[in-house]
Amino acid sequence: MKVTNLELTPEAMLQMGESAVKAVVDHIINLPSSPRSNLQNSAEIARSFHESSPEVGEDFESLLDFFMKKIIPVSINTPHPAYMGYIPGGGLFPSAIADFLGAATNRFTGAWVAAPAAAKLEANVLEWFAQWMGYPQAARGIMTSGGSLANFSGVVAARKHILGDDISRGILYASDQTHHSVMKAALLAGIPEINIRLLNVDQNFRAIPDKFETVIKEDLKEGMKPFFLVGNAGTTNTGVVDPLPELADVAMKYGLWYHIDAAYGGFFNLCSKGKKILKGLERSDSIVLDPHKGLFLPYGSGSLLVRDGKLLRQAHLLTADYLQDHDTPEGEYNASEYSPELSRSYRGLRVWLPLKLFGVKAFRENLDEKLHLTKWMYQRFLEEPGFECMTVPNLSVIAFRYHPQKGNVDTFNRQLLENIVNSQKLFLSSTLLNGEFVIRVCILSFRTHQREVEEAFEIIRNAAKKFESEGGKT
Amino acid sequence: MKVTNLELTPEAMLQMGESAVKAVVDHIINLPSSPRSNLQNSAEIARSFHESSPEVGEDFESLLDFFMKKIIPVSINTPHPAYMGYIPGGGLFPSAIADFLGAATNRFTGAWVAAPAAAKLEANVLEWFAQWMGYPQAARGIMTSGGSLANFSGVVAARKHILGDDISRGILYASDQTHHSVMKAALLAGIPEINIRLLNVDQNFRAIPDKFETVIKEDLKEGMKPFFLVGNAGTTNTGVVDPLPELADVAMKYGLWYHIDAAYGGFFNLCSKGKKILKGLERSDSIVLDPHKGLFLPYGSGSLLVRDGKLLRQAHLLTADYLQDHDTPEGEYNASEYSPELSRSYRGLRVWLPLKLFGVKAFRENLDEKLHLTKWMYQRFLEEPGFECMTVPNLSVIAFRYHPQKGNVDTFNRQLLENIVNSQKLFLSSTLLNGEFVIRVCILSFRTHQREVEEAFEIIRNAAKKFESEGGKT
């Protein structure tokens, strides 16, 4: 089907829609048997797709085919049930439908006045998030593209509230296990790099509140302005949760804004096991939550909650003459007053639709399952000679390495990971802990169940034994 | 269809997809006969959709129906052919399909290594943009959610390059017709509000380069650090284009970063008429372009181009241990190194697909048509007694007002606009120019053609005459 008129006929739209849906469903059905990653010669292949600006159009079916068969497969298979690298999400199908609905109906959801009912659905979702985290009614939030910009707006809200315009002496405190997007957020917000204090952690990779207090006191003595204290509710490296209540005490004592990066771990607060681990979350001034992690959404959904919503608004409210018709009634939610964005896609819908469709119960049970699976796998690692887990998993990350009978541990594990990934049966990623190379398993996709976790453990164990028996050579 | 398992059956997915496509196509077919806006009692209606966190799920068809029939209609009908308020885009259907494809296949496009071929499509689109704007090969860019964050990253790149960490004396210069998101971007980036210089414009609402030079000199004398000069390629108020080459001269002479906000107007550079008007665009250090405006995409697509791409990278590059496997080969594009974001949706696809499907020619012709339609309407305004256009339209905005025989001009036009909008036959918005109320027409939707523009003019003229004959009373 070749088209040149930007206004498509109904038949053309129906046909495109049908083809796209079929292609996607085929793709999802075939996920289990597809390679877990496919990056061989990927640079060369990608380079071959360089092309110049297309003066004339091409047939839709060919473009769809090209995208599904040539573009998508050259990748890490992030929606795969055996994807346990970085932080999985999975990508719920109904969210993809929601993206389609939102874009095709194309209402303006950046300002309340332009689509008040659509704004309400987004406000509902943010209110649910706030309630799940134990925040008060005065809390407000924003849907962002991901955790990075959510962290950014958290820093900006704190900076405005505590430092005002005089930001050069503002100091930020975080453990050295904090996600780099928090530091990046601070730099983007104009905080000088030398004002970022990354503090050592304890042997379980958790922040040490006393250390925070000591450094804050030193900075105060130097005439600096401590303003931002970061707690982690699930670090990326090991998934551990900082001592949140104790960090809250320090932040409160010295009048700092207490920000919790719960991008990965926050939604575990939905289940009772998680709630115990995340105690203290509710004492923060702001929380980052990534629905594209803990709610299994497709990439593109982060969020920020601020306990005292008016402080978020105060840092982002700026208006203009051409927006003079924009009045927001008391109690209603005008996203652009709380966000760095004005026009943007309708992000609320991709969260709202799956929550309404499946109910929160389905998410709670799925998250609970992930905690259980992680415990199960951790137990296997403990029982298996040669394996070392770097810490007891708090949520759903296991950081481990294998100790071969001889040879360098770091080199062995680097190559072990490479062997596992190259087998295309399982995707894992790595990190450094105390400068040492470790492999990470993160169990978070809604498609990952007992069977996949058992298989994953067998793959890891067999790969380690085999590699060791071969003398650790690649 | 009620579902509780997050992993849907193929049948369920196919059915959801089919229902969603049908609902959307129905919606688009019926656009012409639907109200141009529907905001009566909208606050009350929106409030009635407040609901608590849903523990159990609901049937998909009911949710779809609820969204299409209850949520979407309570809005300004932004995709309507007679939508000429603010800055229209329209929302191309294939982009909505692309959003669906991107989200459902859920690859990680924030880092090159995770989806190199997908990254290449996005890099191609950005390269096309750069070429269309006359930028050199060294240019790099990012796809953003909209103009606001594109402006933000422009400020950040300039701040890092010119000011380093010492930002308190950095000064930004822009005409008072500049979009407020530029000022908001500066504030978010930590530039103190008192360092923002908004300068008066000439009688055509265009920046006055000499004035910029005078103020820069004064600031230099005071020991301040002028660093950022903004040119507008299509202001929101009147659509006029600043004297871009002369502003380039000033920026160059004093070593300022020259940033052009072409969010609205930049894509007119694709057609020869537009290219003449936008001369000088190519001399900037950075350009903001909104595909959801000039390429008719659904909301959610802005972009930033930086002439010397490495300066954008330098301001955004920050890495971490858990990303240690991330090597980007020379010449390939790793979005997160240039952007404040890491995880985010696959924004490139929604631009790539319509460009490849229709070809650039279709966009060029459509943009050319918009310039022609604007000229046509402007001519009608000139010929019609009582109407005043505030300036000759440069691109596709006409700012006008009606001078009634008696009564207050401002009050008359405020009510005139209200009458037009309430008629639900046409949607326009307003602004203030020199403190006076004016009505704006912006012709930019791909669904708007000669017929819609003729109808719009008749609606405006008849509304003005009728309202005047009634003595200007509501």
Image (cartoon, coloured by chain):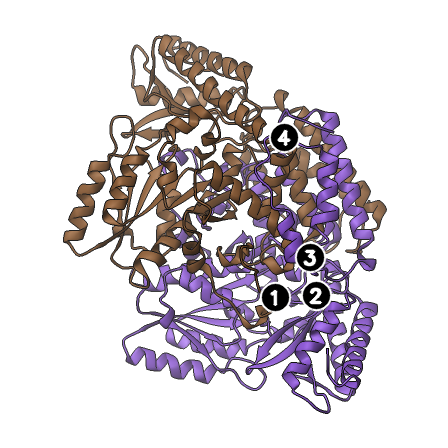
Chain colours: A purple, B brown
If you read the primary sequence from the N terminus, does the residue marked by circle 1 or circle 3 appear first? 3
Q: Left of A38 or right of it: where is B451?
A: left
Query: What is the x, y in percent for residue B144?
Result: 51, 47
Q: Which mark is residue B150?
A: none
Q: The residue under label 3 is which amino acid type?
A: Ser
Q: Are marks 1 and 2 in contact (CB under 8 Å)?
A: yes
| Residue at position x 36%, y 61% in the image | A190
* Disc 3: CA contacts within 10 A as few (<14), some (14-19) or many (>=20): many
Q: Name the chain letter of the residue that bears numbered label 2.
A: A
Q: Which mark is residue A444?
A: 2
| Residue at position x 41%, y 59% in the image | A156
The residue carrying mark 4 is: B358
Q: The residue under label 2 is which amino acid type?
A: Leu
Q: Specify whether disc 4 shares its chain with disc 1.
A: no
The residue carrying mark 3 is: A75
Q: Specify whether disc 4 shares its chain with disc 3.
A: no
* Disc 1: CA contacts within 10 A as few (<14), some (14-19) or many (>=20): many
The residue carrying mark 1 is: A264
| Displayed quadrant of residue A34 | bottom right
Query: What is the x, y in percent for residue B130?
Result: 47, 42
* Disc 4: CA contacts within 10 A as few (<14), some (14-19) or many (>=20): many
Q: Specify whether disc 1 shares its chain with disc 3.
A: yes
Q: The residue under label 1 is which amino acid type?
A: Tyr
